[in-house]
Image: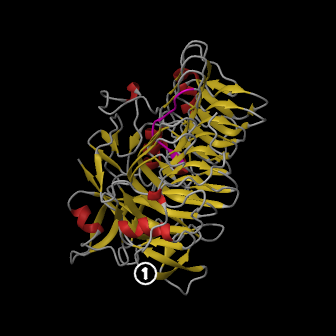
């Protein structure tokens, strides 16, 4: 087992010492919203002072002050830094706050033998929110290292919050006993990772799509990258190993391990409960491995309870223990949980859960699944019906003739649903793409057209137009940068893209039922014009309700339908989608 939770001494090299002569940075006041969003209105409650970060050099210079609050003022490209020095170490951890303001940090490159490696090497009680790390390239070579795209080692016994963080790229640790994750290598203490995702490919001794070694809570999050581990290791599509709780989360990437490994589509080795979560990736282990569609090994009374399922193929070498849901369950139980007997493989049983065929799992929500879930009959497996899960990346969908093109960071292979085999298919997922299509088409109000696999008015402003789904699904699109929209929607921003045939992702906030605000995304597909040529309405598809909505360009708020459930949704940024 990887010893990720071990405390290490501060063995910082000279290259990681605090930067002398750090750049002078502007200080402003931001107010934190309930979902972690920051803004520059100092009159609002919970206002905090933060140091603005505008350049790559300023980001690197955060090592000179590890206890303050920082805010990104714009996107930052780190291509100019050949080998970024992680912010914070075990001896001098980062203890401040980092608010990304939904900006992007791109092209982070690190090659290091340090014990904690990531944008942040070691954090203690830090809060990190609303930032995307795009195209990270991290190689760690130290033994027993903690390696993550966002943070190597996080927590160390105090509260930690990571929220609305996205990572893409490659994270690899070659040292003995190292823990690697798309977002964090190791999380320790009372922490929460919420509403975050990673599409990074991850390799380590304890490897997870989001976290290598975890404690605390993972909630409303997902991972889509491929995960692998070497030796007698642990790996999971979401988390590698640990004793934290997983709630309303999923993984779709493939997971592979060597001889004597313990691997699972969601978690490799866990000692705590997993609730309302699923995995769809293929899971492959070597000889004498424990290989589970959802969990490799559940021990110490861990409960895979209250609505979980797995659909991935499960395979292993000689003497491997294979489980459609769980490979080994020691004093652990699985209730209201299922695995797909059609896709798991011939002769695969399970250490817990109930086996059902693909047809049975797609026919209706299985017994024990509550309103956390929804399903499109015969087209999808159950999927999480929560507006709090950030589906910004897999949102864009377009219908051309009788083909649906879904632009998602999730690949898919299900030959029965294709006209021909998609060029990108790799057996990583059987359900996740259909999940996105079902959300886009509409799941509310028991829509009869879904059962006939019919795309209707939910994709067209003209309700008389219809088309039939017959595949294929592809990844064929390019996303522009997310651009703030302080003023109205006009012909110079969102409308300009719609005029030339681009789809536009709209980001905004809404008022939550229990108070506070949350971030949500829609997909604008067209607009209507007034007699004078000015835009009168923007038409968008909402992935949470499945409804087509109309947005007033001046107020940027939904005006139709009047019963739209996300109260006070208002657009504040946009991101164009170009079809390639």
> Which quarter shows the N terminus?
top right
**Main SS type for the magenta part?**
loop
- Quarter of the view holding residue 338: top right
Asked whether 226 or 123 is in front, the reply is 123
Image location of residue 264, percent across then percent down: 58, 31
Number of numbered markers? 1
Lateral position of residue 253 relative to residue 523, left or right: right
Q: Is residue 1 visible?
A: yes
User: In this view, which residue lies farthest toward the front?
Assistant: 14
Crowd class of label 1 (few under 14; some 14 to 19; many from 20; radius 10 Å): few
Asked whether 25 or 302 is in front, the reply is 25
Image location of residue 392, percent across then percent down: 43, 55
Image location of residue 228, percent across then percent down: 49, 32
- Quarter of the view holding residue 241: top right
Asked whether 541 or 348 is in front, the reply is 348
Q: Is residue 100 visible?
A: no
Q: Which residue is mark 1?
A: 26
Above or below, 273 relative to 151: above
Image location of residue 157, percent across then percent down: 70, 56
Above or below, 141 relative to 387: above
- Span of residues in magenta: 222-231
- Quarter of the view holding residue 339: top right
Q: Secondary structure at mark 1?
A: loop
Q: Is residue 312 magenta?
A: no
**Which residue is located at x 59 percent, y 13 percent?**
347
């Amino acid at each position: 087992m990887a010893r990720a939770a071990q405390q290490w001494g501060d063995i910082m090299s000279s290259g990681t010492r605090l930067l002398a002569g750090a750049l002078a940075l502007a200080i402003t006041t931001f107010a934190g919203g309930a979902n972690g969003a920051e803004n520059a209105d100092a009159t609002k409650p919970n206002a905090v002072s933060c140091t603005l970060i505008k350049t790559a050099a300023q980001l690197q210079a955060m090592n000179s002050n590890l206890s303050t609050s920082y805010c990104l003022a714009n996107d930052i490209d780190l291509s100019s830094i050949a080998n970024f020095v992680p912010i914070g170490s075990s001896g001098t951890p980062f203890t401040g706050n980092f608010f990304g303001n939904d900006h992007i940090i791109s092209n982070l490159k690190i090659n290091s033998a340090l014990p904690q490696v990531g944008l942040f090497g070691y954090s203690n009680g830090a809060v990190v929110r609303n930032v995307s790390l795009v195209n990270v390239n991290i190689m760690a070579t130290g033994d027993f290292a903690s390696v993550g795209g966002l943070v190597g080692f996080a927590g160390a016994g105090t509260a930690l919050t990571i929220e609305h963080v996205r990572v893409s790229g490659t994270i690899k640790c070659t040292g003995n006993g190292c823990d690697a994750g798309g977002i964090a290598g190791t999380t320790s203490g009372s922490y929460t990772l919420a509403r975050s995702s990673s599409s990074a490919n991850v390799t380590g001794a304890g490897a997870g799509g989001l976290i290598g070694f975890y404690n605390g809570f993972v909630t409303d999050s997902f991972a889509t990258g491929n995960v692998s581990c070497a030796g007698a290791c642990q790996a999971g599509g979401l988390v590698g190993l640990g004793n934290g709780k997983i709630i309303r989360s999923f993984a779709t990437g493939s997971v592979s391990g060597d001889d004597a490994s313990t691997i699972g589509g969601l978690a490799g080795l866990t000692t705590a409960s997993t609730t309302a979560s699923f995995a769809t990736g293929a899971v492959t282990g070597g000889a004498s491995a424990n290989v589970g569609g959802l969990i490799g090994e559940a021990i110490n009374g861990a409960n895979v309870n209250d609505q979980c399922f797995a659909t991935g193929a499960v395979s292993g070498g000689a003497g491997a223990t294979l489980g459609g849901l769980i490979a080994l369950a020691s004093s652990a139980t699985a209730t209201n949980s299922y695995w797909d007997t059609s896709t798991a493989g011939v002769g695969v049983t399970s250490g817990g859960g109930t086996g059902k065929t693909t047809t049975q799992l797609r026919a209706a929500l299985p017994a024990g699944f509550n309103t956390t879930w929804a399903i499109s009959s015969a087209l999808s497996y159950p999927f999480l019906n929560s507006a709090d899960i950030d589906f910004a990346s897999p949102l864009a969908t377009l219908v051309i003739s009788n083909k649906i093109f879904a632009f998602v960071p999730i690949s898919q292979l299900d030959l029965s649903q294709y006209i021909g085999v998609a060029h990108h298919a790799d057996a990583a997922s059987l359900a996740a793409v259909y999940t996105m299509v079902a959300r886009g088409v509409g799941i509310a109000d028991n829509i009869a057209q879904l059962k006939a696999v019919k795309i209707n008015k939910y994709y067209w402003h003209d309700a008389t137009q219809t088309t039939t789904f017959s595949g294929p699904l592809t990844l064929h699109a390019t996303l522009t940068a997310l651009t703030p929209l302080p003023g109205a929607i006009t012909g110079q921003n969102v409308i300009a893209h719609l005029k030339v045939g681009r789809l536009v992702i709209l980001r905004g906030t809404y008022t939550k039922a229990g108070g506070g605000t949350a971030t949500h995304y829609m997909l604008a597909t067209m607009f209507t014009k007034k007699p004078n040529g000015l835009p009168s309405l923007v038409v968008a598809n909402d992935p949470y309700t499945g409804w087509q909505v109309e947005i007033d360009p001046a107020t940027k708020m939904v005006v139709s339908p009047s019963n739209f459930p996300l109260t006070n949704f208002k657009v504040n940024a946009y991101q164009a989608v170009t079809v390639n």
